């Protein structure tokens, strides 16, 4: 398994931006598709975005399309989530996750992800 550490969360006003980072350990980062999930208080964890092993394919939940961008730098073993035009409903703990099973493309299913970070809090004030 790969070890994941998120950073970049914080408090921001509605309409603002944040960039989350997820740094991975190990030598095989490029063999993992990567995803971002979030969990708001009292709600189930939900898929946010995912990126394929080589970065050529991305996927987003409808509520963040056009506002969030997922990217990765395999040389730095890091995946990013650029979040623009943030809304109060984006408030949640954001988790990055690694998926070794999905060879091509991406997955929205949390059960396909093998490793998870500890999460970073994002709070958007109105």
Image (tube, helix red, strand yellow):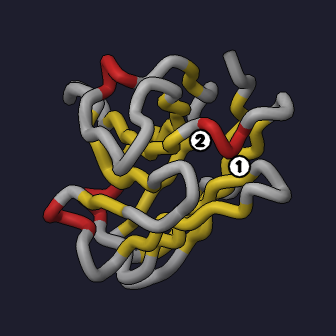
Distance Cα–Cα, label 2 vs label 1: 6 Å
Residue on which the image places disc 2 = 120
* Residue 78 in the image, given as x and y percentages of width and height: 73, 53
Between 15 and 6, the one nearer to me in the picture: 6
Residue at the image point whose x is 37% and y is 40% from the top = 38
Q: Secondary structure at mark 2?
A: strand
Residue at the image point whose x is 70% and y is 31% from the top = 4
39 relative to 33 in the view: left or right:
left
The residue carrying pointer 2 sits among few (fewer than 14), some (14 to 19) or many (20 or more) residues within 10 Å by Cα, namely many
Q: Quadrant of the C terminus?
A: bottom left
Residue on which the image places disc 1 = 7
Between 107 and 124, the one nearer to me in the picture: 107
75 relative to 96 in the view: left or right:
right
- Above or below residue 21? Residue 101 is above
7 relative to 118 in the view: left or right:
right
Residue sitting farthest toward the left: 62
Residue at the image point whose x is 29% and y is 63% from the top = 88
Q: Considering only order in the chain, which callout, 1 or 2, is on the residue closer to the N terminus?
A: 1
- Above or below residue 14? Residue 99 is above
Residue at the image point whose x is 83% and y is 58% from the top = 75
Between 54 and 26, the one nearer to me in the picture: 54
The residue carrying pointer 1 sits among few (fewer than 14), some (14 to 19) or many (20 or more) residues within 10 Å by Cα, namely some
Q: Which mark is residue 100?
A: none
C-beta proximity under 8 Å, tags 2 and 1: yes
Q: Secondary structure at mark 1?
A: strand
Between 51 and 80, the one nearer to me in the picture: 51
Q: Quadrant of the N terminus?
A: top right
């Amino acid at each position: 398994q790969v070890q994941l550490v998120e950073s970049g969360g914080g408090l921001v006003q509605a309409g603002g931006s944040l960039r989350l980072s997820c740094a991975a350990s190990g030598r095989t980062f490029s063999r993992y598709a990567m995803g971002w999930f979030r969990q708001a208080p009292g709600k189930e964890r939900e898929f946010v975005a995912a990126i394929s092993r080589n970065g050529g394919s991305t996927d987003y939940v409808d509520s963040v399309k056009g506002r969030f961008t997922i990217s990765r730098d395999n040389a730095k073993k890091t995946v990013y989530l650029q979040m623009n035009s943030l809304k109060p409903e984006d408030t949640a703990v954001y988790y990055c996750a690694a998926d070794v099973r999905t060879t091509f493309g991406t997955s929205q299913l949390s059960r396909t992800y093998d490793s998870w970070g500890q999460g970073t809090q994002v709070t958007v004030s109105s």
